Image (spheres, rainbow, N blue to C red):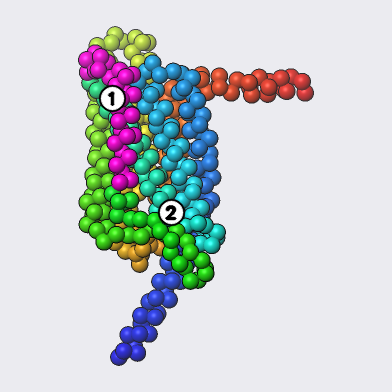
Amino acid sequence: MNTTNSSSTATATSLYIFFIESSVMNYVTINALICSELIGLLGIVANIINIFNFKRQGFQDGVNVTLFSLALCDTGALLAQQLSNILISPWVGEYDLFMLKSHLFVLTFYVNGYFIRVSGVLTSFLTLERCLCVVWPLKVKRVLTTRTAIVVNTVTASVFILYFVPPFSVTTIDWMLVPTLNKSILALQFKGNRHSVMTIYYFIADQFVPYATILLLILCTITIITKLRSKLKWRQSTSSAGGGASGSVTNKEGKVVTMLINISVIFIICLLPQSTLNTAMGFVPGLKVDGVYFNIFKLCYSFTSLLETVNCSVSILVYYKMSTKYRQEFWTLFHPLTCFKNLSLRFF
């Protein structure tokens, strides 16, 4: 009987190693080391363009302040994501690093999480600002000034520094001897109160904050769409038959409604899976860095991180499509290159 149980356990273990380990390596290679890296590099360039573009537009408008901050957050998130992708690569060995790569991955994971959460809150603030401007346009403009936007952005980035406090308060970094490498290497040492502290931390940082952000975004977007549609119906009912102005206004506001829906869908689709994975990690301890299911976490993370990379990288397309001023500054920014291209065409 014991022999049968042992053989069954060995078979299950071999199947787990065959399917999970091979899947992790294949999907990590495709998602993290190819797709995410390429999209991330393009996204970093795109966000640098966004930073220069909004700087050239100036910060007289509070919206530009928040969009500038979002570009900075997306750049930081993508840089941390690029390093995380390299660390989960099967071709990067422990011997090549100064720290256990799974533990170094945890550090970059939290850095990426910080920028993602700040970016999410700022996106919700921007949507809330637009919502209030649509509902109470005259009253809100007196309160939501450029100074207000600067204060909100600064306070948000400062408060979320607390995101690093709980996980690093229950860990220390010390040297650990790795016999297989025949060397000492830095590693995270977990304290005894880790589980009690991290249980509360996961509830606040990985459940309450992300889901509250997404919920606020959905509510504000629905309010904006409902309000704009009611205004459209009112203008259509009061406009004279054959009036061209009403048609142009209807078309313009219809594009705004469509763009707001696109922004919300991109944000929710790209960030909700990672929030769900973080929630699962809070309920299943085996998904953590020293858990028995950490390979499953890496497999899922290769997909969710790819979506986060897409979310941080496609903002330039949204801005270019929705803002005439952005398009003008974009081409002005590359005006020397355009002139050089035109001269080359004329010369040849």
Q: What residue is disc 1 on?
A: 129
Q: In terms of depth relative to the viewer, which is nearer, 298 or 259?
A: 298
Instruction: Name the foreground residue: 221 vs 144.
Output: 144
Q: Residue at x 46, y 18 (%)?
A: 57
Residue in the image at 42% along x and 74% along y: 15
Q: Where in the figure is residue 148, as x and y percent of width and height?
A: 29, 21
Q: Quadrant of residue 189?
A: bottom left
Q: Of the residues under marks 2 and 1, which one precedes in the sequence?
A: 2
**Helix, strand or loop at disc 1?**
helix
Q: Give coordinates of residue 43: x percent, y percent.
A: 49, 38
Label 2 vs label 1, nearer the camera: 2
Magenta stretch encompasses residue 139: yes
Q: Out of 259 and 79, give the one closest to the viewer.
A: 79
Q: Are marks 2 and 1 in contact (CB under 8 Å)?
A: no
Can residue 255 be seen from the camera position used here?
A: no
53 relative position to 212: left or right: right
Which amino acid type is shown beneath numbered disc 2?
A: Phe
Left or right of 233, for residue 116: right
Q: Which residues are magenta?
A: 136-165
Q: Position of residue 277 (x, y in %)?
A: 33, 53
Residue 291's image quarter?
bottom left
Residue 220 percent across, percent down from the top left: 25, 30
Residue 76 visible in the picture: yes
- Three-letter code for the amino acid on which mark 1 is drawn: Glu
Mark-to-mark CA distance, 2 and 1 = 36 Å
- On whether residue 55 falls in the magenta region, the answer is no
Mark 2 crowdedness (10 Å alpha carbons): few <14, some 14-19, many ≥20? many
Q: Secondary structure at mark 2?
A: helix
- Disc 2 designates what residue? 105
> Magenta region's main secondary structure?
helix
Residue at image x 53%, y 51%?
34
Label 1 crowd (10 A; few <14 / some 14-19 / many >=20): some
